[in-house]
Amino acid sequence: MVKDKENYIDLEFEEMKEMWYSDESILFEIIKSLNQRETAIIHYYKSLTHRCIKANAVRYLQKNFQRYKFIPEQFNLYGSLAKYPTFPMFSFSSFVKRKQMDEFNKEYQNYMSGFDFLMDIDNEDIEIAHETAKKVKFIFDKYKIIYWTQFSGFKGFHFRVDFEDFPEWMQLLPKDKLSDTLKKFAENFQIINKFDDIDLSVFDLRRIAKTPYSVVYPYYFVAMPLTDAEFKNFNKEIVSLPNCLIRIESFKNRGLLKREGSPENFGKLVKDYLKI
């Protein structure tokens, strides 16, 4: 399933995408990931981005899908790494929303309760990305931290540690200091382990990432959280939209598949690499 032609639209896959987003169990999994986060939709081909969307209920997500023509267009769905427990509801009026967004962009840190850690492994060759990801996973498992991993939907893998699974000393850091600490940890982690595929540009406080269970352009793969077995034996067929549609019933209440561990162990991992 290779689609190199610009603006390529596969009508058969578009129908599958509509079926995927019409399934309430899938929408519920998406909403669980986006709750208390800034939602954004970004067009893959056009210079078109819509941010500051609140999607804390299925009906709100569906209304925004309709508003921005999400289904018939080639949009990808993103959520912020930051959590905003009191994220405001923005107006459907474009003029009013622009003013609200300007105000939010000035004050966003006042709404923020925390900021997740993302390690983004990206390579044009998915097999190389997978080899790096396996080494990262080995270290995370060795430290017994609480994390989850997903296929990015394109050419790599995401490892996420949610803010709620940070140790207290990290949770109490000022948000800018926390972002700097996580970035320095990732830089050292990359250098020491010689992991050239780690993207170090993901640590600004407004960073967004692909939403779990969303369909990702241009290849119609699903940004799927992975079990250990799926990760170990990864191939793109298991995250292809046709294959996921066949298995759609199995994704009900599947969640993010967090690994067992402790917040203190993540703190130890970070401190160990900050000392180097």
Image (spheres, rainbow, N blue to C red):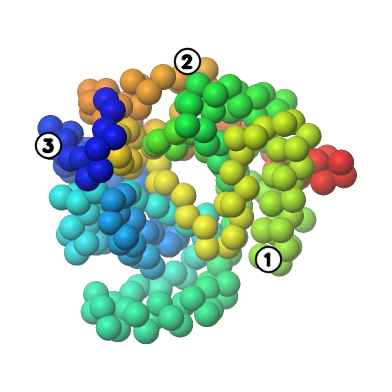
Q: How many neighbours does mark 1 have within 10 angstroms: few (below 14), some (14-19), or many (20 or more)?
A: few
- Furthest toward the front, the residue is 5
List the residue tagged with mark 2.
233
Residue at left offset 75%, top offset 38%: 191
Amino acid type, mark 3: Leu
Residue 173 appears anywhere in the view: yes
Q: Secondary structure at mark 1?
A: helix
Give above or below for 147 relative to 113. Answer: above
Which residue has dot 1 on it? 176
Q: Quadrant of residue 250?
A: top left
For the residues labelled 1 and 3, the Cα–Cα distance comes to 45 Å
Residue at the image point whose x is 58% and y is 31% from the top:
259
- Locate residue 212, reporting x and y percent: 40, 41
Judged left or right of residue 126, residue 45 is left
> For the residues marked 3 and 2, what is the alpha-carbon distance in whole angstroms?
30 Å
Mark 2: which amino acid? Asn
Q: Nearer the viewer, residue 144 or 20?
A: 20
The correct choice, above or below, for 276 with respect to 58 in the image is above
Dot 3: few (<14), some (14–19), or many (≥20) neighbours within 10 Å? few
Name the spot of residue 202 as percent of width and height, x first.
57, 52
Task: Name the amino acid type tagged 1.
Answer: Asp
* Residue that carries the numbered disc 3 in the rendered image: 11
Pick the quarter of the image with the N terminus: top left
| Label 3: element kind | helix
Between 140 and 198, the one lying in front of the other is: 198
Residue appearing at x 18%, y 40% in the figure: 9
User: Which mark is first along the chain, 2 or 1?
Assistant: 1
